[in-house]
Image: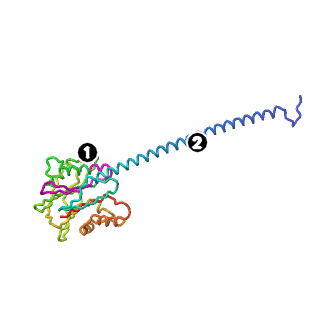
Amino acid sequence: MSVIPGIETAAAPADRLAALEAELASARAELDDLNLLYQATIEHGEAVEDQLAEANLALQRTQKRLTEELTEAANYIFSILPEPRQTSPRTEWLLEPSTELGGDSFGYHEIDQDHIAFYLLDVCGHGVGAALLSVTAINVLRSAALPNTDFRDPGAVLAALNDAFPMERQNNMYFTIWYGVFQRSTGVLRFASGGHPPSVLRKADGMVLTLSTPGIAIGMLEGMSYRAAQCAVGEGDRLHLVSDGTFEVETAPGEMLAFQAFVDRLASSDSPAEVLGWVRGLNGPGPLPDDFSLLSIQF
């Protein structure tokens, strides 16, 4: 049969229709694949959201537990601090950590009927490790748990502490300390310090003395010896034991409070709270950069 030019055979539209149907089937298959991928993505996203929600709840529970434990630890640290003495020599103190747990601590106790010890120490750094070392050292002093040590001799006490707490066995932590012993019968105060800021003695006549001896921080080098010094203390004198956090604040950007300015202010105040308020005013808003510890003793 002849084909008239310009007129297609019946087979040609059928071939194109088959091709279109095949293309449509391919498109439908591709759409089905995309739908499956979309559904999988949605389900995966929901699973990820569920996992994130569970992880967030676990994190909140952990944070709550850690906060409670830090609070409990801080409460314990404060619980071992001594009650203020109401009989001569009377005491007043203030401790305000810059974080939940700090490395400052202090104490005082009767060695015998004629001698009473006063001490304040500052462990390097902050946090749980510093707090643990601080509490341990204070308990050692309070319980006189240094063998073959005369606790009436400040130099011997610091040397024994240095032997007992080498920084290599304390996670590379060390501490500074000021330790003094007052003898009632003679009115003599013997003292020694290991890398610690001087204590400030305001005499009843207005004279102000800073009390310190040379010596490196406890635990830094083994086999160290520490020299004690002494001074007379009379009725009406007031002794202030401090940590470096009481005065190491910026009075202006890049300018630190001069230690002598702090001594002058300390000597004119009878209240640790007054000194803290003054230091806060210099520091400005926000927490102090270090723990604030001040122990005042009225003779």
Q: Amino acid at mark 2?
A: Ile
User: What residue is at 15 percent from the left and 46 percent from the top?
Assistant: 147
Please, which residue is most extreme toward the front here? 86
- Which residue is the extreme one toward the bottom? 205
Q: Secondary structure at mark 2?
A: helix
Q: Nearer the viewer, mark 2 or mark 1?
A: 2
183 displayed left or right of 195: left
User: Which of the two discs, 2 and 1, labels the residue nearer the N terminus?
Assistant: 2
Mark 1 lies on residue = 169
> Where does residue 20 sit, x and y in percent of width and height?
75, 36
Give the amino acid at mark 1: Arg
Q: Nearer the viewer, residue 118 or 41?
A: 118
User: Badge 2 local density, few (<14 within 10 Å), some, or many (20+)?
Assistant: few
Nearer the observer, 151 or 41 = 151
Alpha carbon separation for disc pair 2 and 1 = 54 Å
Taking the spot 10% from the left edge, 61% from the top edge, the residue there is 185
Name the residue rendered at 55%, 40% in the picture: 44
Q: Quadrant of the N terminus?
A: top right
Instruction: Report which quarter residue 89 is drawn in.
Output: bottom left
Q: Position of residue 138 (x, y in %)?
A: 23, 52
Residue range highlighted in magenta: 105-133
Which label is found at residue 42? 2
Query: Residue at 84% of width from left, 32% of height from top?
Result: 10
